[in-house]
Image: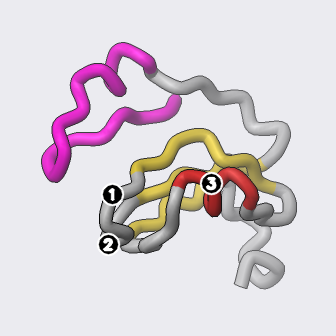
Amino acid sequence: MLKCHNECNILCITEHWKTEDYLKNLGINGFKLISMFCREKGFGGSAVYVKNGLKCKVRAKLNKLSIRGEFAGAVV
C-alpha cells in the first residue's frame, strides 16, 4: 500500500495488539518508530511512524500529560 501512496509521511496505527519489543523490532521500510503505546494485555495500542528524513520531535511535555484511554503524546 505504501508503494502506491508514496506521498505518505506519517503512519498512525491503532489497535495493533503488539508488545513494545515487537514494535521496536518491526521495520517499516522508509519509516522510523517515533511514538507508541502498548496495553499490558495485548489489546488495543497505537504507534506512530515517521518517514525517514522528515524533521520531527517527540513532544515530551505532552507525553507527560498522557492519560490511558483519553490522550496520548503528539509529534511535530
At which x and y percent is residue 51?
A: 75, 50
Q: CA distance from mark 1 to mark 3?
A: 12 Å
Which amino acid lies under the numbered mark 1 shown in the image of this protein? Glu
**Residue interval drawn in magenta:** 60-76
Q: Earlier in the sequence, mark 1 or mark 3?
A: 3
The local secondary structure at tag 1 comes to: loop
Percent coordinates x, y for residue 56 in the rendering: 64, 29
Query: Could you tell which of marks 2 and 3 lies nearer the N-terminus?
Result: 3
Image disc number at residue 31: none
Q: Is residue 31 left or right of residue 35?
A: right
Q: Looking at the image, what colour scheme do you see?
A: secondary structure
Q: In the image, what residue type sits under mark 2?
A: Phe
Prevailing secondary structure class for the magenta stretch in the rendered image: loop
User: For the residue marked with disc 3, what is the amino acid?
Assistant: Asp
* Residue 68 on image: x %, y %: 19, 45
Q: Nearer the viewer, residue 69 or 58?
A: 69
SS under mark 3:
helix
Q: Residue furthest top?
A: 61
- Residue located at (53% from left, 26% from top): 58
User: Are the two marked residues, 2 and 3, in contact with CB atoms closer than 8 angstroms?
Assistant: no
Q: Which mark is residue 40?
A: 1
**Residue ID at (41%, 49%):** 37
**Secondary structure under badge 2?**
loop
Residue hosting label 3: 21
The residue at the point 24 percent across, 32 percent down is: 66
User: What whole-number distance in Å separates the C-alpha atoms at marks 1 and 2?
Assistant: 8 Å
Disc 2 to disc 3, C-alpha distance: 15 Å
Q: Are marks 1 and 3 in contact (CB under 8 Å)?
A: no
Which disc number belongs to residue 43? 2
Q: Which quarter of the figure is the N terminus placed in? A: bottom right
